[in-house]
């Protein structure tokens, strides 16, 4: 389950579950990185139970972001608005939100939409 609150540290993910989670984070960008694509994806943040990680430093400039969440049982499903994008399942990555061509080790995964509204700081709480 997900819940969001204003917080003291930009866009932060807090893991309140009993399993380590891996996070990939997709953020809008001002200039297109490919054709008209204006999204950038970074991964992975591995967050142990009871821990948190800042996935985007600084004030939040946009009202929506996307996260992909997985644990040792696999990817979490999406409840609500979502998009499918590519991630590297085993290695850190920092890419334009376009699936590489020709097919590589990247795989398609679901990213959940997170609306932060007008908040300049936001914490996404992951709960069982």
Image (cartoon, grey):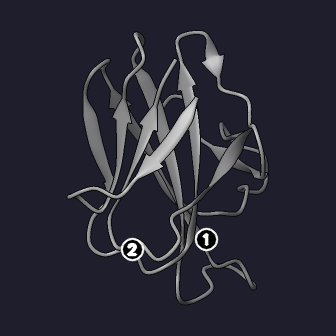
Q: Which mark is residue 60?
A: 2
Q: Residue at x 40, y 10 (%)?
A: 18
Query: Marks 1 and 2, Cα distance to the nearest angstrom?
Result: 15 Å
For the residue pair 91 and 7, the one nearer the viewer reads as: 7
- 94 vs 29: above or below: above
Residue 33 in the image, given as x and y percentages of width and height: 60, 80
Q: Secondary structure at mark 1?
A: strand
* Most distant residue in the left direction: 8
Looking at the rendering, in which quadrant would you find the N terminus? top right
Q: Residue at x 48, y 24 (%)?
A: 127
Q: What is the tally of numbered marks visible in this picture?
A: 2
- 12 vs 77: above or below: below
Q: Residue at x 66, y 41 (%)?
A: 106
Q: Secondary structure at mark 2?
A: loop
Per the image, the residue denoted by label 1 is: 39
- 120 vs 128: above or below: below
Residue 82 in the image, given as x and y percentages of width and height: 76, 50
Q: Residue at x 46, y 48 (%)?
A: 4
């Amino acid at each position: 389950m997900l819940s969001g609150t204003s917080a003291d540290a930009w866009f932060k993910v807090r893991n309140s579950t009993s399993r380590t989670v891996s996070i990939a984070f997709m953020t809008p960008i001002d200039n297109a990185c490919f054709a008209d694509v204006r999204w950038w994806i970074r991964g992975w943040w591995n967050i142990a139970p009871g821990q948190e990680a800042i996935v985007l430093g600084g004030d939040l400039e946009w009202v929506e972001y996307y996260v992909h969440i997985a644990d040792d049982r696999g990817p979490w499903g999406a409840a609500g608005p979502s998009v499918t994008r590519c991630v590297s399942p085993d290695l850190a990555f920092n890419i334009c939100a376009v699936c590489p061509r020709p097919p590589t080790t990247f795989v398609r995964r679901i990213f959940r939409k997170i609306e932060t509204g007008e908040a300049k700081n936001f914490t996404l709480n992951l709960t069982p």
